């Protein structure tokens, strides 16, 4: 017997949940570095153009699909045409693979929180992170053994996600009331503390000084669209699932603008927090700021802890920082789980507890490889392909599906009827023409670079294993799920 569909307890709960899914680790450790690399303050121009041209229009599209159909991604897309259901299953497969390694990064944060009272004993955080914590092997082909602290962190992450989504939208709505505002407040606190540090001005100058010549480079615009696309949680099926828990007459357009602009603002504020402390670190080492700029885990688990140990009340700020990382990541991670659970529930009408148990068990087991000595390399390679190709392919095909195989004007009229304010026909043109063109160019440029330069120095056969093979498996999974007859 089918369970009654969950409904968000309030509009605030929905908005916070979507913000929680969109605002993640990429806002803290990816955006500042990308802005620095592509023109500093000038990068903000293509970044916000990308938000309005691609990010928000695609958010509106996914909100519309979920809310109008009251279904998760597979069944929502099947309303356009039966074969489009395959795209929905492919989307949640992408989310499933991503959550298997995203949960490990949350496990790192759990483990670091446990080291709050012993940070004073760590003299070199780079050596500690790579050798003592990750036990990093010589390369991706040397997997090695399982690291117990990371494994335990992975267990804690999955337990947390299961408890959060166990009762559906109602329990998620309660959790995000805390986990979404908290990291935003902590980030502001770090930004305010950072700009008071000696040398902070040097870092902020590097972050904000515009290099307008960068605007003439195609790479800058592609980087901006890429950052927005990956940051908005588009292409996972998450936003479709979350919107399916709204009432049919709920606002769509204003909610999408709130989520998108909040995500952009958070990334911008993160730049102040990151580059002010990098300026401080550079001054203390007598180096140019550019020499200490890092992106990704190196920033979060090496640079920031190193800086925090030099601050008053170091243990408090250390704890606060990793609580922030954990809450930023956990909202994004459990939203990916929810998207998968919703899709299976709509199709097979299984009880959510059954789906969550099976999904979590498989996801946990698949995540174990990332807890090994070679896990960091595998995480990096898989993430590259799924964030560079998987999400972009889904977003591109969603735009094509709505723009070319559906009545976009009918969709726009529905959204205008239920929303606080209306959108014009520009949305139709964005979905039908601009977004597909931009994403096709993005895919083409990345593919050419991959063929010419490879990625990460990894062997070609490893790249094939972590990229094309996984994506092909996603297509096979999607076709199989589409062929299964729905339970009624």
Image (spheres, rainbow, N blue to C red):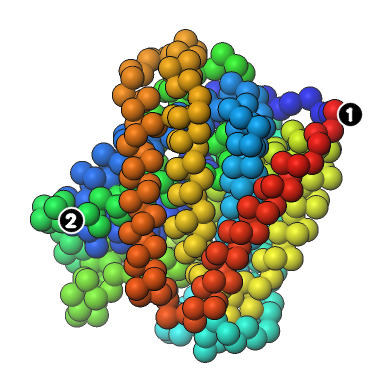
Q: Residue furthest bottom?
A: 138
Q: Is residue 208 visible?
A: no
Percent x, y of residue 71: 66, 29
Q: State how far apart marks 2 and 1 are (Cα).
A: 56 Å
Q: Residue at x 69, y 70 (%)?
A: 368
Q: Residue at x 16, y 51 (%)?
A: 215
Classify mark 2: helix, strand or loop: loop
Q: Residues within 10 Å of mark 2 (few under 14, many from 20)?
A: few
The quarter in which the C terminus is drawn is top right
N-terminal-most mark, 2 or 1: 1
Percent x, y of residue 44: 23, 46
The residue that disc 1 covers is 1
Q: Is residue 71 visible?
A: yes
**Residue 275 occupies which quadrant of the picture?**
bottom left
Q: Nearer the viewer, residue 483 or 237?
A: 483
**Image position of 328 with respect to 142: above or below:** above
**Image position of 272 with respect to 307: above or below:** above
Q: Nearer the viewer, residue 306 or 52?
A: 52
Percent x, y of residue 49: 26, 39
Percent x, y of residue 60: 45, 29
Q: Nearer the viewer, residue 205 or 478?
A: 478
The residue that disc 2 covers is 217
């Amino acid at each position: 017997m089918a369970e009654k569909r969950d409904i968000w307890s309030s509009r605030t709960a929905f908005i916070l949940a979507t913000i929680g899914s969109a605002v993640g680790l990429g806002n803290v450790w990816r955006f500042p570095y990308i802005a620095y690399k592509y023109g500093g303050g000038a990068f903000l121009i293509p970044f916000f153009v990308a938000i309005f041209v691609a990010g928000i229009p695609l958010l509106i599209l996914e909100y519309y699909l979920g809310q109008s159909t009251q279904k998760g991604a597979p069944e929502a897309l099947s309303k356009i045409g039966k074969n489009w259901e395959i795209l929905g299953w492919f989307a949640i497969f992408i989310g499933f693979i991503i959550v298997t390694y995203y949960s490990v990064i949350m496990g790192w944060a759990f483990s670091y929180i446990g080291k709050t009272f012993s940070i004073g004993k760590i003299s070199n955080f780079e050596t500690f992170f790579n050798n003592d914590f990750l036990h990093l092997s010589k390369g991706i082909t040397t997997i090695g053994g399982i690291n117990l602290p990371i494994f335990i962190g992975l267990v804690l992450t999955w337990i947390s996600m299961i408890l959060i989504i166990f009762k559906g939208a109602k329990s998620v709505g309660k959790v995000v009331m805390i986990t979404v505002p908290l990291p935003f407040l902590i980030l502001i606190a770090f930004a305010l503390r950072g700009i008071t540090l000696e040398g902070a001005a040097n870092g902020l100058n590097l972050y904000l000084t515009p290099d307008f010549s960068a605007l003439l480079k195609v790479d800058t615009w592609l980087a901006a669209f890429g950052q927005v696309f990956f940051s908005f949680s588009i292409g996972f099926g998450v936003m479709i699932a979350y919107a399916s828990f709204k009432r049919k007459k709920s606002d769509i357009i204003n909610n999408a603008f709130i989520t998108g602009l909040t995500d952009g603002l958070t990334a911008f504020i993160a730049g102040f927090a990151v580059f002010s402390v990098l300026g401080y670190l550079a001054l203390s080492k007598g180096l140019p700021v550019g020499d200490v700029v890092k992106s990704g885990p190196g920033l979060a688990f090496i640079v920031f802890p190193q800086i925090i140990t030099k601050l008053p009340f170091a243990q408090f700020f250390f704890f606060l920082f990793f609580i922030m990382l954990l809450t930023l990541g956990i909202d994004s991670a459990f939203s990916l789980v929810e998207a998968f659970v919703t899709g299976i529930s709509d199709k097979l009408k299984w009880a959510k507890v059954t789906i969550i148990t099976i999904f979590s068990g498989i996801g946990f087991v698949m995540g174990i490889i990332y807890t090994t000595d070679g896990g960091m390399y595998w995480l990096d390679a898989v993430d590259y392909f799924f964030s560079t190709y998987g999400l972009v392919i889904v977003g591109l095909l969603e735009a094509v599906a709505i723009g070319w195989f559906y009545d976009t004007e009918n969709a726009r009229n529905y959204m205008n009827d239920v929303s606080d304010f209306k959108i014009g026909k520009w949305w139709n043109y964005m979905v039908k023409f601009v977004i597909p063109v931009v994403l096709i160019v993005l895919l083409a440029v990345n593919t050419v670079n991959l063929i010419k330069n490879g990625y990460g120095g990894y062997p070609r056969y490893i790249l094939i294993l972590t990229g094309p093979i996984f994506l092909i498996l996603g297509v096979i999974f999607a076709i199989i799920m589409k062929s299964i007859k729905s339970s009624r």
